[in-house]
């Protein structure tokens, strides 16, 4: 491997950042044929440069809880690469957040954003704050304190954060309010905003919808579609919720949803009525998915994942490395034909290898979940030119973007000798766009 020695140096230089190593390794593996044909990338040390974030900010976030006690968290923003546009990427609030996880997410974001065809660089940020069990007032005070440092590093043409795990409409509202207050400017510094203050219709839906659209495109290459297919989905947050809705609208039957406590298995399918229950449970009452099983009398698998359900299609929509080798084996034994990653890097490398070796259509997150950030890009553009679009118009653009991503990724895979391998196709397509832009702009 041309990149073997560099990979070793990256691991030594970034100790303990195992998710970051994993993400870089996957990209490097895919790039071999490109590097052979284009030695100029190696000569200009593009790989050495692309794995080093432009800048990473870490800061203290101090806030007062409802009992009057002072709490201290750690906040981050990793601004990875802005060769093709302002930094763009979500904020994650979860107790597991650390620099390595945010670097993996920021690194992936660089390539994902390039795939959308929109001018966006890559970044990620967040904090080791756990919004679970906190009151609205606590979440607001945390967000205000977080933005009191972050605001000086971001801006509409510099860096535009959005949501991710633990950051949804409520958090974006508090963050935007604090930014506006500190800067005395109303500007498009975040996406995922409320509809009344600059947000885009269909942004909440976009990641889940896009994941289903991408899956349809993959199935189309085998003259199939989602109609009549049984689908296992993990997670029950933003991405999972709208993946469930779109798969159902397209004629599929979703039989699972999950959270970090366990999985519900509903062989009758999560229809529109049951879906409304989930929306209220997760977004209003902020309860656990086990309540679904109590309400509808289906199976609940405490502490277990969705992947033991028999299904034609799997959509992991919760978190990284949530689908491992044994899960992949089980899915393959049960006849899975396609896997579309709604989450970022949910399948381990061993699981991906098994899917590819067994002819399962496999869509990596940077392609399949790019609909979210693409619609964020549409929101930014809309804010800049001061117009608004109907839900139908945004959905049409989102659908077209997913069709384009599928085509471009499939074309690259074929061109570089791995037809049908969307991992290779996505990494190469994203890389070539960013790397050639870096070459154009000189050495720095
Ligand atoms: P949410 O916070 O809305 O939902 C996350 C869901 O995943 C919850 O059901 C949560 O369960 C579950 N989950 C989180 N961490 C774990 C864990 N360690 N083990 C098991 N389950 C877990 O986040 P999103 O839906 O926004 O994000 C889901 C995934 O999609 C992430 O990988 C994110 O990076 C990715 N993504 C999100 C986009 C977006 O626009 N929001 C865009 C592209 C990708 P619990 O409530 O119990 O924690
Ligand atoms: O991982 C992702 O692409 C996101 N969390 C969405 C980022 C964005 O800027 O909309």
Image (tube, rainbow, N blue to C red):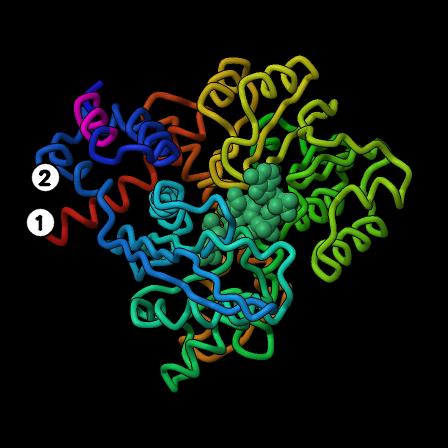
Q: Is mark 2 within 8 Å of ligand 2?
A: no
Task: Name which quarter of the figure residue 264 lies in.
Answer: top right
Residue count near mark 1 (Cα–Cα under 10 Å), binned few <14, some 14–19, many ≥20: few
Residue 297 visible in rendering: yes
Residues shaded magenta: 4-11
* Whether residue 277 is situated above or below residue 179 in the rendered picture: above
**What residue appears at the point 42 percent right and 30 percent down from the top-left corner?**
423
Q: Residue at x 60, y 33 (%)?
A: 220
Q: Position of residue 346 (x, y in %)?
A: 52, 34
Q: Along the horizontal axis of the image, is 92 left or right of 329?
A: left
The residue carrying pointer 2 sits among few (fewer than 14), some (14 to 19) or many (20 or more) residues within 10 Å by Cα, namely: some
Q: Quadrant of the N terminus?
A: top left
Q: CA distance from mark 2 to mark 1?
A: 8 Å
Say whether mark 1 is within 8 Å of ligand 2: no
Tell whether label 1 touches label 2 (CB within 8 Å).
yes
Q: Is residue 17 magenta?
A: no
Residue closer to the observer: 310 or 14: 14
Above or below, 55 relative to 354: below
Q: Measured along the vertical axis of the image, is residue 141 above or below residue 73? A: below
Q: Which mark is residue 443?
A: 1
> Which residue appears at 69% of the width and 28% of the height?
304
- x, y percent for residue 334: 70, 16
Q: Which mark is residue 44?
A: 2
Side of 208 where 10 appears, left or right? left
Question: Can residue 318 be seen from the camera position used here?
Answer: no
Q: Nearer the viewer, residue 156 or 132?
A: 132
Q: In this orientation, which residue lies closer to the viewer: 63 or 161?
A: 63
For the point 47% across and 68% down, the residue is 63
**Residue 8 is a magenta residue:** yes
Q: Secondary structure at mark 1?
A: loop
| Dominant secondary-structure state across the stretch colored magenta | helix
x and y percentages locating residue 287 in the rendered image: 74, 52
């Amino acid at each position: 491997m041309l990149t073997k020695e560099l990979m070793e140096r990256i691991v030594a230089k970034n100790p303990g950042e195992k998710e970051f190593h994993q993400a870089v390794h996957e990209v490097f593996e895919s790039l071999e044929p490109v590097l052979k044909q284009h030695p100029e990338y190696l000569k200009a040390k593009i790989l050495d440069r692309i794995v080093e974030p432009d800048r990473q900010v870490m800061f203290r976030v101090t806030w007062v809880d409802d009992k009057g006690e002072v709490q201290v968290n750690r906040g981050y923003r990793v601004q990875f690469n802005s060769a093709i546009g302002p930094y763009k990427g979500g904020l994650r609030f979860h107790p597991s957040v650390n620099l390595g996880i945010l670097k993996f997410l920021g690194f992936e974001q660089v390539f994902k954003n390039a795939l959308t065809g929109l001018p966006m660089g890559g970044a990620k940020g967040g904090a080791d704050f756990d919004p679970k069990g906190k009151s609205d007032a606590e979440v607001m005070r945390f967000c205000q304190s977080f933005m009191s440092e972050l605001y000086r590093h971001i801006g509409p043409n510099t860096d535009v954060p959005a949501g991710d795990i633990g950051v949804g409409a409520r958090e974006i509202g508090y963050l935007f309010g604090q930014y506006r207050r500190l800067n005395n400017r109303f500007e498009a510094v975040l996406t995922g905003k409320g509809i009344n203050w600059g947000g885009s219709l269909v942004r909440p839906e976009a990641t889940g919808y896009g994941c289903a659209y991408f899956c349809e495109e993959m199935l189309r290459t085998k003259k199939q579609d989602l109609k009549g297919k049984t689908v296992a989905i993990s997670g029950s947050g933003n991405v999972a919720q709208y993946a469930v809705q779109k798969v159902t609208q397209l004629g599929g039957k979703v039989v699972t949803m999950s959270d970090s406590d366990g999985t519900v298995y509903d062989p009758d399918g999560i229809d529109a009525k049951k879906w409304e229950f989930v929306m209220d449970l997760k977004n209003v009452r902020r309860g656990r998915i086990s309540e679904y099983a109590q309400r509808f009398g289906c199976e609940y698998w405490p502490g277990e994942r969705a992947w033991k359900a028999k299904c034609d299609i799997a959509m992991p929509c919760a978190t990284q490395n949530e689908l491992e080798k044994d899960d992949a084996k089980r899915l393959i034994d049960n006849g899975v034909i396609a896997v579309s990653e709604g989450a970022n890097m949910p399948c381990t490398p061993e699981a991906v290898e098994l899917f590819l070796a067994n002819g399962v259509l496999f869509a990596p997150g940077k392609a399949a979940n790019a609909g979210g950030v693409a619609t964020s890009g549409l929101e930014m553009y809309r804010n800049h030119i001061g117009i608004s679009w109907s839900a139908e118009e945004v959905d049409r653009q989102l659908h077209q973007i997913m069709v384009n991503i599928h085509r471009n990724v499939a074309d690259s895979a074929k061109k570089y000798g791995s037809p049908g391998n969307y991992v290779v196709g996505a990494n190469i397509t994203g890389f070539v766009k960013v790397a050639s832009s870096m070459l154009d702009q000189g050495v720095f």
